Amino acid sequence: MSSTMDLESKSGSAGSLPNIEPPKVYKIRWFILFLFVLFSASNAMQWIQFSIISGVIRDYYGVSKEWVNWTSLIYMILYIPFIFPGSFLLEKLGLRLAITIGILGTCLGAWIKVASVDPDRFYISFLGQGVVALSQVFVLSVPARLASVWFGPDQVSSACSIGVFGNQIGIAAGFVIPPMIVPGGTVHEVTTQLYILFGGVAILTSVLLVLILLFFKNGPPTPPSYAAQQQNEEKGSFFDSLKNLIKNKSFVLLLLAYGINTGVFYAISTLLNEIVLNYYPGAEIDAGRIGLVIVVAGMAGSVCCGYVLDRFRKFKETTVVVYAFALIGMLVFTFTIDKGLYVVYVVAGGLGFFMTGLLSVGFEMGSELTYPEPEGTQAGLLNAAAQVFGIAFTNIYSPIFYQVNDTWANMVMSVCLAVGLFMTACMSSDLRRQAAMAAANK
């Protein structure tokens, strides 16, 4: 980027830090964030692509409901072993190369699924889903890192929440679009419907691949804040950072609490179609729309929480309050799901606002507790915990749901959320990044 680039002023007195160049932020940061949001959405929309139309997929490919659930679980399973090399590459290669690898994998997997449209080719479709799932390693850890690299201290939390917002847009699309495009029918009709669904996603990701190759930048010419510059100067090795994170007791508590909340969300999302149809047979489209409501409400929650964090800097307090309302939302969902579809829509919206809204809050709380460790590393650990709990809770929820009932399954999830809330309350309020910003501005 050159000096012709428009600058938005953000310079202050360096005070006692005369060797530090006054920070600047660049207008192009919003376009960089927009490209990432689109990329994140294109990857996330394929996560629930099969599960939300599980009945059609089972009949077309002749597979069991467990295999359909595995198309969602593969996202979580592959993330766990590959997040550590993924985080290492993010820190060593930078944002541009990591994002490029991610969009290449997402695009390739989407085209593999186009080639899988035949009743005898479920294994090809599963392979394509696996390639897209593996590319997720270069998605989930990025928002906190991108925000700190490109955005100033008064926008970093909001930018992180918008980055998480992209993942939620994709999940929302994954809930609502497949039931609309693939309503079912004869084998010939479903074949045409799947070609439209998979082909549309493949074309979208191909366009994004070209845009990212042309326009995505690794970082601005100068750091956007004193804290970001100091973090660059103090950056140690990846393994030293990993060791420091594991030794941080408050971060470990956050890690477990975040994993529990996100794991519950993954379990409910994976089985949402089955949960809704259990009470409202034939409501496949409503199941997708309810999933959409959950995620759209979560987008609003993420943005609102990001604003609150930037405005008031009450990181622990915000985390505890949002977590408490997520627990309350889960309890209300448990005991009102049989009260009518309109009630389910409303309650699901409240549940999504807080449960999904907690995602960006967790990233920012992690950045505060672990500064100056790289954001990508701590975010990678948070997401790894989410995948572990997602796999565990989906496999706990499913047998209870099928062999007992959904009320008991939901109550087990609620107890887990209560444990997570207790862990959140036990975290310290050691806001290291805020302290570094305050010290640099004196």
Image (cartoon, rainbow, N blue to C red):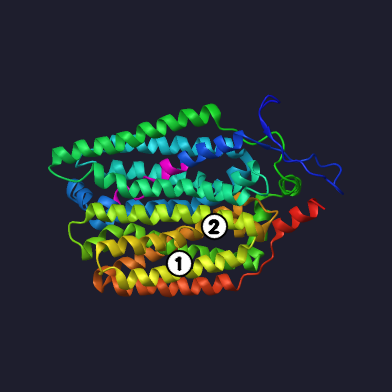
Residue 381 shows in the view: no
According to the picture, the residue beneath numbered tag 2 turns out to be: 305
Residue 259 horizontal/vertical position (percent): 49, 63
Residue in front for this viewpoint, 304 or 252: 304
Q: Position of residue 104 (x, y in %)?
A: 46, 34
Pointer 1 local density, CA inside 10 Å: few below 14, some 14–19, many at least 20: many
Inspect the magenta stretch and tell me whether residue 41 lies in it: yes
Crowding near pointer 2: few (<14 within 10 Å), some, many (20+)? many
| Residue 343 in which image quadrant | bottom left
Most foreground residue, 141 or 368: 368
Residue bearing mark 1:
326
Q: Is residue 238 left or right of residue 385?
A: right
CB within 8 Å, label 1 to label 2? no
Which stretch did the figure color magenta? 40-51
Q: Position of residue 220 (x, y in %)?
A: 66, 35
Q: Please name the residue shown 38% across and 45% down the image.
A: 45
In this rendering, the answer to whether 426 lies above or below 75 is: below
Quarter-wise, where is residue 305 in the image? bottom right
- Look at 61% across and 39% down and name the residue there: 94
Where is residue 358? Give x, y as percent: 50, 60
| Horizontal side of residue 54 vs 201, given as left or right | left
The amino acid type, in three-letter code, at marker 1 is Ala
Task: Check residue 236 for magenta coloring.
Answer: no
Which type of secondary structure does the marked residue at label 1 adopt? helix
State the separation of the CA atoms marked 1 and 2. 13 Å
